[in-house]
Amino acid sequence: RKEVEQDPGPFNVPEGATVAFNCTYSNSASQSFFWYRQDCRKEPKLLMSVYSSGNEDGRFTAQLNRASQYISLLIRDSKLSDSATYLCVGMDSSYKLIFGSGTRLLVRP
Amino acid sequence: GAVVSQHPSRVICKSGTSVKIECRSLDFQATTMFWYRQFPKKSLMLMATSNEGSKATYEQGVEKDKFLINHASLTLSTLTVTSAHPEDSSFYICSARVGRQGARSSGNTIYFGEGSWLTVV
């Protein structure tokens, strides 16, 4: 079983739509969690950290449910520029980042 | 904010030769750097953890004699792909952990380099 698992997609949504990504993790990747965004042929860029209390940054909302070992990312009012691959990432106790395979989002006009 | 610089961004080399990729933290000290490899449409896979002044810790299945990692200073780690083969062609990315608490960052903040595309022909 992979340590961090997420639906590869692609999610193909119209501009303005709300889209949600889900991710599950195993115990070893259980210290901290993040969502990264990766554009084609580029390095990953931190989108936001994920906290148990849930956190919001503009159109983006992240949730963490430790009991279910489940992480989510909600994007409201999708923009064309949101098209990218979204990586669910866990950090273990030695600061290693464990990446999910990524969920590809395509926002169409 | 913190910046990690990786060089070269693209490199083409012949089979059997060696290639060195550099990863520098530009405005912070990085006690730990990580090297990842990413094949097309695949996730990033951790290759090794590099700690300043000590030997790198390699992940299972990664050949330490093939992928030489040196972390000689708090701002520089290098990955050398030795005797490169076409199957080593990949996107190599480094990341660096901020070594200490600072006004702008916390101890578990990770910054990524821009990545290096290696093509072995």
Image (cartoon, coloured by chain):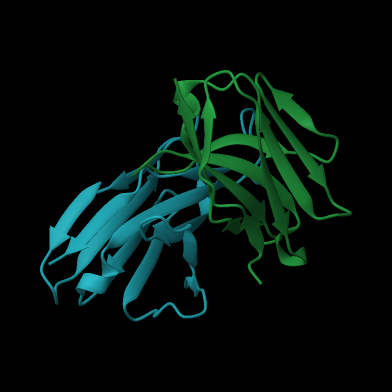
Chain colours: A green, B cyan
* Quadrant assignment for the C terminus of chain A: top left
Horizontally, residue A69 falls left or right of residue B45, namely right
Compared with B106, A76 (above or below) is: above
Question: Could one spot residue B116 in this view of the protein?
Answer: yes
Residue drawn 18% across the image and 54% down it = B11
| Residue in front for this viewpoint, A48 or A73 | A73
Horizontally, residue B95 falls left or right of residue B18, namely right
Number of numbered discs overlaid on the protein picture: 0
| Residue in front for this viewpoint, A3 or A46 | A3
Residue drawn 24% across the image and 74% down it = B82
* Quadrant assignment for the N terminus of chain A: bottom right
Compared with B36, A42 (above or below) is: above
Res A2 → quadrant:
bottom right
| Residue in front for this viewpoint, B1 or A62 | A62
Horizontally, residue B11 falls left or right of residue B30, namely left
Image spot of residue B24 (x, y percent): 37, 46
Residue drawn 77% across the image and 65% down it = A27
Image spot of residue A54 (x, y percent): 81, 33
